[in-house]
Amino acid sequence: MRTSISLYHRHRFPAEIISHCVWLYFRFALSFRDIEEMLAMRGVALTYETVREWCLKFGQIYANGLRRKSPRPGDQWHLDEVFLKINGRLHYLWRAVDQDGDVLDILVQSRRDKKAATKFFRRLLKGLRYVPRVIITDKLKSYHAAKQELMPSVEHLQHKYQNNRAENSHQPTSLRERVMRRFKSASRAQRFLSAFGIITSHFRVGRHLYRASGYREVMKLRFAAWEEVVVAQAAA
């Protein structure tokens, strides 16, 4: 009979410290060395390379767990793409968020034509497994061409200023890119942003939407969901 082994098996540090380091890295604009110093101040001696390995191993796993525990996103999708220069070559960061600003998915591609837009739509539909009521984009024609092929019945809005929610969602990524002194490759950018988008979105609650007591309650629920994901990996 096969028995499951905890994901933290053979790790010298407990899950609480590992998950805390991963949370610090993906939630705030901190480097691995920053986290090493913060833990050292609390009497925990580890190296920044250890933090790097934890983030590579656990970041996407935690993000996937949060995605599974989150309620189904909204039926209004905002999509946008921004330029991303990696090693002197131009890439495009495609991002989709719902009407509440929660990140649906992120994809780094070298093009922004119909083929690239279709690939992004397919990825969204496969991961979310439902069709939105309306999508809102800028006036890039690739969106319309891909939408007509995959979601012809979905309403498509392309009016100016209606897509500010998607455009604003790029700001945390731009900040992290500066802290990391640009991404070193498209694959590394994709690996980091896939986890970063979900984790940072989970903890970025619209503070202006709640009274103080309501905000504290929402954050309490968000942290509880995070702890459930961490514990689930220990029990796996």
Image: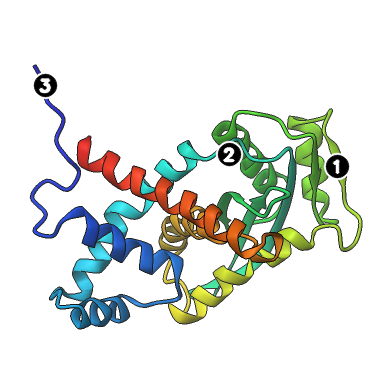
Q: CA distance from mark 1 to mark 3?
A: 50 Å
Answer whether residue 181 is visible to the viewer in this image: no
Quadrant of image for the C terminus: top left
Q: Nearer the viewer, residue 107 or 60?
A: 60
Amino acid tagged 3: Arg
Could you tell me which secondary element the residue under label 2 belongs to?
helix
Which residue does the image show at 11% across and 21% down from the upper left?
2
Residue furthest right as drawn: 159
Q: At which x and y percent is residue 26?
A: 42, 64
Q: Earlier in the sequence, mark 1 or mark 2?
A: 2
Q: At which x and y percent is residue 158?
A: 88, 52
User: Based on the displayed image, in which of its 4 quarters is residue 139 positioned?
Assistant: bottom right
54 relative to 27 in the view: left or right: left
Could you tell me which secondary element the residue under label 1 belongs to?
strand
Q: CA distance from mark 2 to mark 3?
A: 33 Å
104 relative to 59 in the view: left or right: right
Say if mark 2 contacts mark 3, CB within 8 Å.
no
Q: At which x and y percent is residue 208?
A: 70, 66
Which residue does the image show at 47% across and 56% down from the upper left?
199
Residue marked by disc 2: 123
Q: Nearer the viewer, residue 61 or 123?
A: 61
22 relative to 18 in the view: left or right: right
